[in-house]
Image: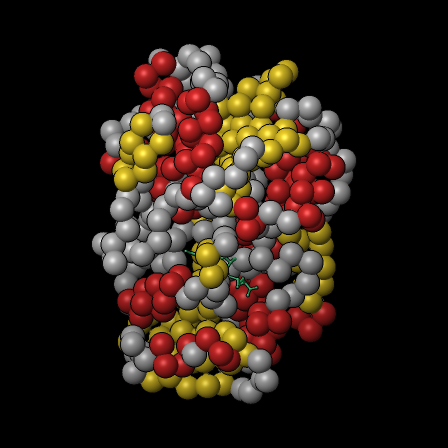
Amino acid sequence: MMTLPLMTSALGNLTIRRVPYSRKETLQAFDQADILALDYLHDENLLSSTSRVLVINDSFAAITSTVSMAMVSKLGPMPVLWSDSYLAKLGLQANAKTNDLPQAGFVQAQDTPQGPFDMVILRLPKSHGLLLDQIQRLLPQLAANALIIMPVMVKHIDNAVYQLLESALGELTTSLARKKARLMFASQLVEGSRKSPSAAEVVWDVPTLGLSLQHYSGVFGRTKLDPGAQVLLDNFPQGPYQRVIDLGCGNGVQAIAAAKKWPLSQVMGVDESYMSVASASLNAASNGVAAQCEFKAGDCLTDMNIKFVDLILCNPPFHQERVVGDQIAMRMFAQAAKVLTPEGELWVVGNRHLGYHAKLKRWFKRVEQIGAHPKFVVLKARL
Ligand SMILES: C[S@@+](CC[C@H](N)C(=O)[O-])C[C@H]1O[C@@H](n2cnc3c(N)ncnc32)[C@H](O)[C@@H]1O
């Protein structure tokens, strides 16, 4: 069933789609919390021709696009979107184009947007580490009397998040709930107490490989090696291979292991998280394989050369922020089938119950299980 892409708020109507665009898409690019925040901006008359608005973690730029439309009518400055997501940047560009709006600013999560901002709309990321890091870097960029509005779906707020926000932002107030959404406000801002290490302060070792890995905030498996990643490393392909891709590279551990194992190979890591790409680049350099490795922000393997790669290593994501499902894994497999040479191999690790074996057969003729582990399977897929 197709979802309706029309987003209606008191600030006006826009067509807001998820990216990549699909006619069969069943998920919406915005939620009731986005609409509640936009209605509030309108009803309280909070936008003026001088407002400098920062929007944070706006998944497909629904809020940013609507604020852009409002600022165009006020002849004011365009808002800025600050996000760790390459898909959010694509969403910002696509939704501006569809609605004939000028481009808002975009700042990648590892950089800090330059204020002073007097209005901040903060969608809470799933990662508490990223949330604290963003707040700590945001506070010095606020104008006096700045207001932070946090639109939330009620089910995503628990005591732990609430306490974390109060310790970083001072006393919070909340709106009444509407359609299971609510707004939280911070306006009595305090300097954030340092509760978590910030960018690349977390360092841990993978003794079996002699690697030391650093992580920016929000990156998958931040303080220890992911068990699935370990199982793939324990059942690594033998090779040799010349062109290798680490698809959904996170901290780059698979890419770095490949570069070390096959010193003549060229390895590329792709991730939709900018913090991941930055961490992986840092890790390749600190582990001595920077010359062999390239990391880039991207959506799966879109824009890659077809029939070009010998080996793809993949520990796929099983959720997109709070939306759980295997839709991204399926896109990864479909695109891997196009990018591999006829004799190329896709190696996937996943939880047994996800049933990747049968799913891979949609695109790959030969799928075999490598190694045995009670919880995970490693699968080798060939065309
Ligand atoms: C399960 S983690 C694996 C990380 C790392 N390869 C490892 O083995 O520890 C999956 C990764 O896929 C990334 N990802 C999610 N959606 C993506 C997309 N559309 N394109 C590329 N990477 C994506 C996530 O950011 C995350 O880093």
Residue 202 appears anywhere in the view: yes
- The number of numbered badges drawn on the structure is 0
In the picture, residue 305 is in which quadrant?
bottom left
Residue 240 appears anywhere in the view: no
In the picture, residue 376 is in which quadrant?
bottom right
Residue occupying image coordinates x 46% and y 86%: 369
Residue occupying image coordinates x 52% and y 39%: 177
List x then y, in percent, for residue 96: 30, 33
Q: Is residue 195 left or right of residue 251?
A: right
Compared with 102, 338 (above or below) is below
Compared with 129, 252 (above or below) is below
List x then y, in percent, for residue 94: 30, 39
* Image quarter of the N terminus: bottom left
List x then y, in percent, for residue 75: 35, 13
* Image quarter of the C terminus: bottom left
Pick whichever, 189 or 95, lies toward us: 189
List x then y, in percent, for residue 204: 72, 59
Pick whichever, 273 or 263, lies toward us: 273
Pick whichever, 196 or 208, lies toward us: 196
Residue occupying image coordinates x 58% and y 80%: 375
Residue occupying image coordinates x 60% and y 50%: 127
Q: Is residue 13 left or right of residue 221?
A: left
Compared with 104, 311 (above or below) is below
In the picture, residue 170 is in which quadrant?
top right
